[in-house]
Image (cartoon, rainbow, N blue to C red):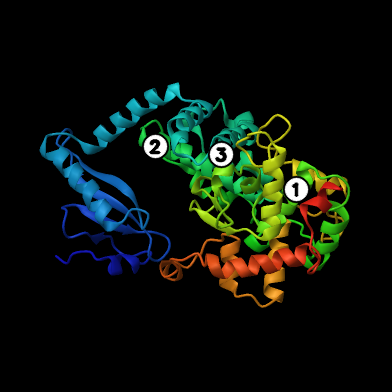
Amino acid sequence: MAILSDLKARNIKPNTPPVADGTITGLRLEPGKTKGHGKWTLRFVSPVSTKRRDMGLGRYPDVAISEARELASAARDLIRRGKDPIDEREAGKRERSVSSQIYTFRDAAVLFHESSKAGWSSERHSENWISSLEMYVFPRLGCRKVNELKAKDFAEALRPIWVQKADTASRVKQRCSAIMDWCVAREVSEDNPVGVVNKLLPKQPGSRERVQHHPAMPWRDIPHFVKSILHTGKPSLSKLMLEFLILTAARSGEVRCMSWAEIDFETSTWTVPASRMKAKTDHRVPLSARAMEILAHQKETINGEEVVFPSVRGKVPSDAMLSKFLRDNRVKSSDPNRTATPHGFRSSFRDWASENEYPRDFAERALAHTIKNAAEAAYHRTDLLDQRRNMMDAWATFVCGLGVKTNVISIRGH
């Protein structure tokens, strides 16, 4: 008897005879309604009832040939020990059904969350993870038993946000799926129905349509903004922090949480630790003379605080501070009727670098962007700090007024 190959299985056609596996007695693949699809069955004589029975082992190609053979082999072992594999499976289902009574979806979510959050990137991520379920899923499914949930239940929970908040809906769906996978692994649910939820919902907008770019100030407008807003009047925490953010093309969180231990004054270099970087690797930032002036000002002004830009209470400033400053000053972006955002200045810097013909590699490394091509990333083992330093000095010169020197005294208003 020929052994069933994957090639032959992929070519199985509807309305043709079942194909024997050829390795496990009684195991065969019955054709489905479409080419390349079928159902695994194991035909055997029950050692309990002495009747011939067919045991389903899943559908091909969801259940691969190797997996079907393992399942069939395990069933044959039970038969040799005088047990009916179908009866044993039904008994197991009944046992798991009883066990599953202790879990509602909310119970399962909380237990999974508690057992998994130690491996997540931050406490904030942990809080967002469970709060998204509390907002969008628990009101409808929280009190339902996990073994009763179907794909349509998750679809109805996600429907209100599926199109309008596509990214949020996708994240919530992934979290629901992780919970149900956990339930399957603990044998309190037979399957995970979340995987087919997409089939019951309308098509989501494509990734390009979903992207909401941070409103950015046109790069040519930045010198005027710095001179007329940041360098006018008395200095403030928001002004100094925002100017430092612009000069370094850094993310808001990287600047707000910056500590003095990260600054090397001898080499004018700021090293952002991996724990605060999106790419989870250390990032060195060459500091221009103007950036160093701001740090010197902070060093003189604050009293022994660990954070470079501390709030009034000596803590890390709120992530809303810089956004509020831009809104209060009605700082326009290139998007009509939208205020510029702190993150948008990274885009402004990137446009300036391109317009001034700096190598793409320099600009991307200044922004600490991850190289997505694995082969390319393997050969990039230097961060090009020295080469980037000239670029960041030129950027600072432009930002501070196209060559017009701006010093700490002018900022203080003396």
Q: Which mark is residue 330?
A: none
Counting other residues with Cα less than 10 Å from the Cα at mark 2, is it few (<14), some (14-19), or many (20 or more)? Answer: some
Query: Looking at the image, which is closer to me, 137 or 72?
Result: 137
Occupied quadrant, residue 314: top right
Q: Is mark 2 on a helix, strand or loop?
A: helix
Residue 158 seen in the current view = yes
At 71% from the left and 63% from the top, the residue drawn is 396
Disc 1 on helix, strand or loop?
helix
Q: Where is residue 176 in the image (x, y as percent from the top left)?
A: 52, 39
* Circle 1 residue: 240
At label 1, which amino acid type do we have?
Leu
Residue at 64% over, 75% down: 358
Judge depth for marks 1 and 2 and give the one in front.
1
Residue indicated by mark 3: 125
- Residue nearest the observer in this picture, 317 or 2: 317
Q: Which residue sits at x=61%, y=48%?
A: 254
Where is residue 83 shown, x and y percent of the image? 16, 34
Q: How far apart are marks 1 and 2 (CA)?
A: 53 Å
Locate residue 411 relative to residue 163 in the image: left or right.
right
Closer to the N terminus: mark 1 or mark 3?
3
Q: In this view, does 268 lie to the left or right of 65?
A: right
Q: How crowded is mark 3: few (under 14 residues within 10 Å), some or many (20 or more)?
A: few
- Residue 184 marker: 2
Could you tell me if the residues under marks 1 and 2 are in contact, i.e. CB atoms within 8 Å? no
Left or right of 318? Residue 70 is left
For the residue labelled by badge 3, is the local secondary structure a helix, a strand or a loop?
helix
Residue type at mark 3 is: His
